[in-house]
Image (tube, rainbow, N blue to C red):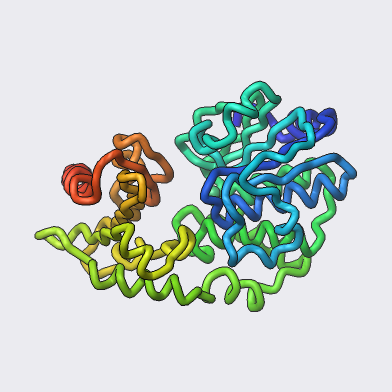
Amino acid sequence: MVNSLAEIAQKLHTCRSVLITSHHAPDGDAIGSILAMGLALQQLNAAALMFSADDVPKRYQFLVGADKIITHSLPTQDFDCVLALDCADKNRLQPIWDKIENKMIINIDHHPTNDLFGHLNYVDHTAAATGELVFALLQELGCRLDVAIAEALYVAISTDTGSFKFASTSARTHRIAAELLAAGVNPGTLSPLIFDLRSRAALAVLRQALAKLSFSADGRIAWIALTDDDMQQAQAAEEDVNGIVNYAKNIEGVEVGLLFREQADGTTKVGFRAHQTDVGKVAASFGGGGHKLASGCSLREDLQTAVQKVLAAVSEEISQ
Ligand SMILES: [Mn+2]
């Protein structure tokens, strides 16, 4: 934790203008946390700018305030403080780090690999989502939980817990969710938008992926290797591959599921999902990171070499 929420709330009150941001390729926790924080500061009449280095995924664009998130280039308005949400280290803020490193940085996160890169840090890896920590901060700030904020936090928490299914889901997670429902969240209308609705491109790329499913000789590792060409053919965007790695993981007998994606620049992105094996450690050994059972990395290798290297490292970790 390092700093208390009270210290962070106090600092926020003294900032003239706050840039609220999260990691590139934002997920539900990133977007939901940015929005909840942005709406809350607005409510407190504090100057806040919401920023994402990449586009807001389509499935989260219905959220109130999502159209106010500035994307790609930093806003021209000045800010003296940065609220970095759900970022384990400065690499996660890479596209903008050079431009923010001399500002006051407040780091709020739940990744166990967080290296406390902020001037103020509130890091709690027992939280299932950064949204849980934002919820606590909003209480500290004395902010009113309106429907828009509650929906943003519900998106953050329900997506990062895979619909309250992951081991990280705690009694606290459910208590916060109960508060969000009491504030007006309707899971029946939100869940289909967040979890079920798929673009045609997402289905097209899933079809390619399933056709390429491979297994290790002992059946403990299942992986999918997608070429850049597969992505082009399916006309798939980054967000269309979300969740595909779970198809590999959730097969009988499989311990670790992997998704390899060839990038246009010749590098390969890898997503790891495991039942028990510490794939956070494996991803970290390749310069990536994440959680014990869900992690990712990027290799400066072609697809085939990346598959060989990562499979070797994963089987090594499984046999430990
Ligand atoms: Mn998160």
In this view of the protein, can residue 171 be seen by the observer? no
| Closer to the camera in the image, 314 or 101 | 101
Give how far across and how far down residue 72 sits, in percent. Answer: 61, 45
Horizontally, residue 210 falls left or right of residue 122, namely: left
Q: Residue furthest right?
A: 45
* Residue located at (64% from left, 72% from top): 190
| Closer to the camera in the image, 125 or 244 | 244
* Residue located at (84% from left, 54% from top): 144
| Closer to the camera in the image, 48 or 199 | 199
Horizontally, residue 241 falls left or right of residue 319, namely: right
Placement of 6 over or under 212, stated as above or below? above
Placement of 72 over or under 59, stated as above or below? above
Quadrant of res 60: bottom right
Quadrant of res 281: top left
Give how far across and how far down residue 315 sits, in percent. Answer: 17, 48
**Quadrant that contains the N terminus:** top right
In this view of the protein, can residue 102 be seen by the observer? yes
Give how far across and how far down residue 41 sits, in percent. Answer: 81, 45
How many dots with numbers?
0
* Residue located at (50% from left, 41% from top): 111
Q: Residue furthest left?
A: 217
Give how far across and how far down residue 125 sits, in percent. Answer: 52, 41
| Closer to the camera in the image, 167 or 315 | 315
**Quadrant that contains the C terminus:** top left
* Residue located at (53% from left, 63% from top): 164
